[in-house]
Image (cartoon, rainbow, N blue to C red):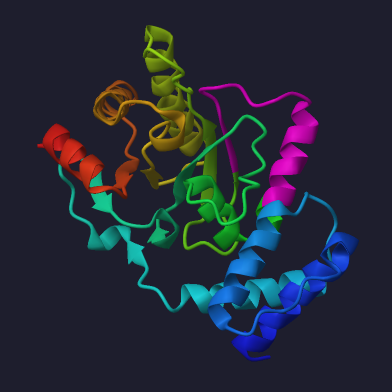
């Protein structure tokens, strides 16, 4: 199959799954097709799917990934011992684990082509990620608590694993509890990473953006919590603070000196 044929196959498979899509016409341009495929993947509930679909999807996502520059740990220089700062798309970073800031359902973002990190990670990892998350949540039997963390495979991402954590949502005024819960997110991810003997982890800016945590205070909590954890446990894990916005780059650059 060519990449275009894979794209057409995946879209048509997902359209045939649901009678509500019976009137949807396959777009003519590749850009529109890619948007439609991502949208269909985003809204699809976690349910059984054929191995053939997964094989084609994996080939498609891997080929798409090959079109981008993948950044590995060896290309980064530490700002301090074991602490790194990198600006870019976390789904193109090759580390042992990247951190996903999700919601308490832990199933990914269901809003088609939404700009959040949760949507991007699920979109580029593939259908399998939501299926694995669903199994985890079924076994747990309750929503994910804020400040905790779960681990899954990364599937079609360059990283080996994904650490999923739910950060606090700031509704009005920032509280001490919000700050404590955010610190817990970082500790939980580090503890889980060490439990799995991972050598490197990349944190996104948890709870900023959609969850309205002030960027500067979130950055301070992130650096302080990670530094205290490494000093206390003598963990040798390498930590990347991944930022996307210029605002966060400036914040972390100042915090890390």
Q: Quadrant of the rendered structure where residue 136 is?
A: top right
Outermost residue toward the bottom? 2
Q: Is residue 221 visible?
A: yes
* Magenta span includes 138: yes
Residue 172, image quadrant? top left
Question: Could you tell me which residue is drawn at 75 percent across and 77 percent down?
Answer: 25
Residue drawn 62% across and 87% down?
Answer: 4
Q: In this rendering, is residue 69 above or below 218?
A: below
Q: Position of residue 192 (x, y in %)?
A: 51, 33
Q: Quadrant of residue 207?
A: top left
Q: Position of residue 130 (x, y in %)?
A: 69, 49
Q: Is residue 82 visible?
A: no
Query: Where residue 189 sits: x, y (%)?
Result: 47, 33
Q: Position of residue 60 (x, y in %)?
A: 61, 77
Query: Residue 22: within the magenta?
Result: no
Q: Nearer the viewer, residue 14 or 222?
A: 14
Q: In the current view of this chain or complex, which residue is farthest to the front?
A: 23
């Amino acid at each position: 199959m060519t990449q275009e044929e894979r794209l057409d196959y995946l879209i048509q498979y997902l359209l045939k799954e649901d009678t509500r899509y019976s009137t949807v016409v396959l777009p003519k341009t590749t850009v529109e097709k890619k948007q439609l495929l991502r949208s269909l993947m985003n809204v699809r509930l976690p349910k059984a799917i054929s191995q053939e679909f997964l094989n084609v999807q994996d080939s498609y996502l891997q080929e798409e990934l090959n079109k981008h520059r993948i950044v590995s740990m060896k290309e980064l220089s530490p700002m301090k011992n074991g602490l790194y700062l990198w600006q870019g798309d976390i789904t193109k970073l090759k580390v042992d684990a990247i951190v996903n800031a999700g919601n308490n359902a832990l199933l990914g973002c269901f809003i088609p082509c939404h700009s959040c990190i949760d949507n991007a990670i699920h979109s580029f990892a593939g259908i399998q990620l939501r299926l694995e998350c669903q199994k985890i949540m079924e076994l747990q039997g309750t929503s994910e608590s804020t400040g905790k963390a779960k681990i899954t495979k990364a599937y079609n991402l360059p990283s080996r694993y994904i650490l999923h954590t739910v950060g606090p949502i700031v509704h009005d005024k920032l509280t001490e509890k919000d700050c404590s819960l955010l610190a817990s997110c970082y500790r939980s991810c580090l503890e889980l990473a060490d439990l799995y003997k991972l050598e490197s982890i990349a944190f996104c800016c948890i709870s900023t953006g959609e969850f309205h945590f002030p960027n500067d205070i979130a950055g301070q909590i992130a650096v302080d919590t990670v530094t205290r954890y490494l000093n206390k446990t003598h963990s040798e894990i390498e930590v990347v603070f991944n930022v996307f916005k210029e605002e966060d780059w400036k914040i972390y650059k100042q915090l890390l000196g």
